[in-house]
Image (spheres, helix red, strand yellow):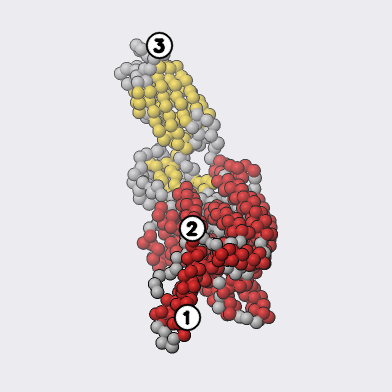
Amino acid sequence: MSATAPYAGPSPIRRPVAAAALLAALVSLVFGLLLAGAGPASAHAALTGSDPQDGAVVDTAPKEVTLSFSEAIAVGDDSIRVLDPSGKRADTEAEPRDLSEGGTVRYGVALHSGLPDGTYTVAWQAISADSHPISGAFTFSIGAPSETTVALSSQEAGGGPVGVVYDIARYAAYGGFVLLVGGSAFVLICWRGGASALPMQRLVVRGWLTLTAATLVMLLLRNPYTGSGKFADAFDLAGLQSVLDTKPGAALVSRLLLLGAAALFIAVLFGTYARREDEQEKKDLTFGLAVGGGVVAAGIAATWAMSEHASTGIQASIAMPVDVAHLLAVAAWLGGLASLLVALYRTPDIGSAAVRRFSAVAFASVVVLAATGIYQSWRQVGSWSALTGTRYGQLLIIKVALIAVLLAVAWFSRRWTGRLTDASVASSGAEAASSRAEVGSSGAEVVSSEAEEADAAAAPDEASEDIAPERAAQLARQRAVLTATKKKRIRDADPERSGLRRSVLAEAAVAVVLLAVTTMLTSTEPGRTEEEAAGGATAATAPAAGPVNLSMPFDTGGRNGKGTVRIDIDPGRTGSNDLHVWIDGSDGEPMDVPELKVALTLESKDIGPLPVVPDRLAEGHWTASGVQIPMAGDWKIDVTVRTSDIDQVTIDKNAKIG
């Protein structure tokens, strides 16, 4: 007899495999698009002010530079660096001093004495209280602006290849948590028989492996992610030690320890519990596993709550347990959904009672999600303008819309669940088997024919005392294939079960996108703090008053010495500005002159004159970029025009800047 497996027509396993492949492709596509468009993670804390301010020109060198932030931050020795025009350190290179008081977060670094005039660059990098790295740079000048050779990296903190890998690990960690916790809860609450089902065991174990691997990657990459951005620093022991001393590092280590306890839970669930036959003993063990597993799951969820958005901002003591409940509800709903999908496609034994129990669990999870989500939305957004005008608010709107779509699809799933009965499954399966035996498709006839041949051929061999082990193994494989094919055909023959499978698959597809958006929310600056930071930055610097436009007639007294000077200062506020000067002759046509000078003076503060030497851009048009205006006020604009070797005049006009 041929050793090949019997032909059964188009493989009945192809459809679930194709569905799983489609779902995996959707996961990859969604995460790829989100990672490609996300860039470095937005930070919770933001720079709200500095002394000196960005672009300021001071008469004498300050003794220190201070920076103010919207939220608490963690700083190191080189978190704030001040570089002179040549790129050398102008600060004392000591650890920044904590100058915070009241609700103001401020840090400062001392400067060397006797610093020369010129433009100085302040580069800073720190870690926000919600674990995300933040960085930035600005300049100020002593005496007068000058050229600078300082070239800072354009890569933001948390960006680059290290940032991409770290973000992938973050997404994987959430996915693994959902499968681990949701799959375990599904077995204990909805379908206890699933403890002995190999596909369910694989689902939960893969969730544990994914979460463990992702946590290890995040722990190793934490130092380069918040620092140099180089993969080689992942194995720097000093850097790893510094990570362990931080709140995010402690959270990752705690998660690894809890995953060790989770491994023991999995071993008992799919080992001792699956083999237990006495109902009372199994009931007692179910209670113990539920309590122990619930504690471990809550502990793992708390490792996110203690190190991200929930741990900082308003009402942190309330927000952290609410965040834990939110994460557990997400895992019970979405992880249970994945478990139900696997059970419907890969196991023949799940009945209607288990599906209905999951429906109740899903409903309870949605109620918890709604309550905790409303609180989190109020806490992180706080206003309609933040909901519609910030990235966090817009992602939150997308999340709510996806939940609405998921609930709509779930409603159809509940309709299929209402039609599903174990009796109908058996009846339809028997009828389908009978029909195939009488007429059947060509594939089914081949299966039946070859099954009879295999049994007939096996009978004399099995009666023989000296049956060959190879032959026995071959027959066992054939019987296994035939049994799996028959069970699969019985499952597929039930229209209610097939409809439920399709509906749950659609739910899972939406859930993948929902989980991705939820993960993005954890790395995006909350709308409330984004608006507060923007307001603080606006208060720290004078508000923009719009471009300044001036027109001044002049007469040098010589031949062709009359004309008009037009000046634009854009954006017309403190800091860096672009200056444009046009000169029109008495005939209104552009007019070139041998020399043009501009100076700015703030007489009320004894600042200036600050000289500006614009470059000729075209006939009658001069320009200067990066003109620094240190503070708001009523500035006098002096313009010197020379039309010949001996004919020149200086004219002036006041303008409100800032």
Residue farthest toward the bottom in the current orientation of the protein: 465
Quadrant in which residue 431 is drawn: bottom right
Observer-side mark, 3 or 2, equals 2
**Element on which disc 2 rests:** helix
Q: Residues within 10 Å of mark 2 (few under 14, many from 20)?
A: few
| Nearest to the observer: residue 572 or residue 134 | 134
**Element on which disc 1 rests:** helix
Q: Residue at x 55, y 72 (%)?
A: 197
Which residue is denoted by mark 1 in the rendering? 459
Q: What is the C-alpha distance between the residues marked 1 and 2? A: 38 Å
Residue 270 to residue 600: above or below: below
| In the displayed structure image, the side of residue 658 where residue 165 appears, left or right | left
| Nearest to the observer: residue 525 or residue 258 | 258
Q: Residues within 10 Å of mark 1 (few under 14, many from 20)?
A: few
| In the displayed structure image, the side of residue 275 where residue 206 appears, left or right | left
Query: Mark 1 or mark 3, which has the lower sequence index?
Result: 1
| In the displayed structure image, the side of residue 412 where residue 77 appears, left or right | left
Residue 265 point in image, percent of width and height: 57, 75
Which residue is denoted by mark 2 in the rendering? 18
Q: What is the C-alpha distance between the residues marked 3 and 2? A: 79 Å
Q: What is the C-alpha distance between the residues marked 1 and 3? A: 116 Å
> On residue 636, which mark appears?
none
Residue farthest toward the front in the current orientation of the protein: 438
